[in-house]
Amino acid sequence: MKIAIIGAGLAGLTAAGALKHAGHEVALFDKARGPGGRMSIRRTETALGMAFFDHGAQYFTARDPDFAAEVARWQAGGSAARWPAAGADAWVGTPGMNAIIKALAADHQVRWTCRIESIAREVKGWSLRHSEGTEAADAVIVAVPAEQVADLVAVHQLDWAELAQATHSQPCWTVMAAFDAPVAIADDCLRTRGAIGWAARNSAKPGRTGPESWVVQGSPDWSTAHLEDEAEAVSALLLAELAAMAGGVLPATLSVQAHRWRYAMSGSAGRTALWDGSLGLCGDWLVGPRIESAWTSGRALAALVVSG
């Protein structure tokens, strides 16, 4: 079949790889400018060189043996490495978290900056509408966050749309700061400290270069309470929390940015993947808020398609 996949994150790309291996023709469409999604990175020029930040997912683990084998392949290809500072089973993409998505996307036809506005069943197959026209496919896979599912599938699978609407993500404010000297904190990562849900010395991760760089993420409750605050205010509040952990003073900042993730950590619908014969859903939100969950869901959907 010719299969169109909406969403070129880990779930969509995992499904695409398995389907291509099984002999299907696959085309992916993603509204983003490039690979990343929740595994995105940000780069900023500073007086001390380029600073890099993993401003989405910070690391991942591999518990399922099949996923662990996949991660080993990523490691062998140079796109993943262990990060012991976050735990014995912690992994990161190298030189940035999006390296894994970039490597997977390189094997496929992906149209970036292409937002699929609607899908429609035709007498034979499907049509997908976007700003530049339409695409035809025999089957469609929707691999986007839960909050974006209903608009695409409600006309065709109302129960799937309702399931997605009932599966809520948690928001997260993320502050990215580069400094002209090391921050006086011994550990490279911190968890659950007041307003901070997570803070990490990003420049200490494997394969990273550039000046002292930190990613500071608000806790889910704090981020929810401050969701509509201005970025500057959020940056000041979270960096004040980081300063308190560093003895009250931070080095001079080279750059400071804040990013509001409205849908940072997915919920869990208690499913793995959904398929009706020509329309399918996959994504971490069906399984749980882990990178491994996205891979598990994409692989499971591909298996459903291949089995008929």
Image (cartoon, rainbow, N blue to C red):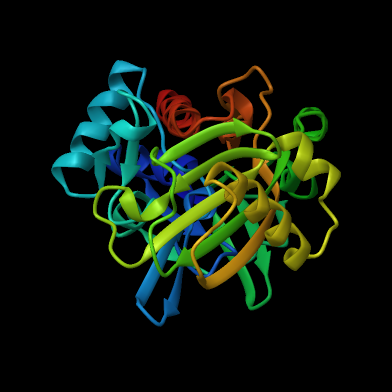
In-front residue for pair 62/127:
62
In-front residue for pair 155/282:
282
Instruction: Locate residue 272, reporting x and y percent.
Output: 56, 22
Q: In this rendering, is residue 185 above or below 157?
A: below
Instruction: Locate residue 26, reporting x and y percent.
Output: 41, 52
Residue drawn at x 34%, y 42% as measured from the top left: 92
For residue 151, side relative to residue 260 (left or right): right
Residue drawn at x 42%, y 38% as measured from the top left: 59
For the N terminus, the quadrant is top left
Image quadrant in which you'd find residue 189? top left
For residue 118, side relative to residue 209 (left or right): right
Instruction: Locate residue 81, reporting x and y percent.
Output: 24, 41
- Report whether residue 283 is seen: yes
Q: In this rendering, is residue 50 above or below 304?
A: below
Q: In this rendering, is residue 69 above or below 3?
A: above
Q: In this rendering, is residue 164 above or below 210?
A: above
Instruction: Locate residue 39, reporting x and y percent.
Output: 47, 50
- Report whether residue 114 is seen: no
Residue drawn at x 69%, y 22% as measured from the top left: 269
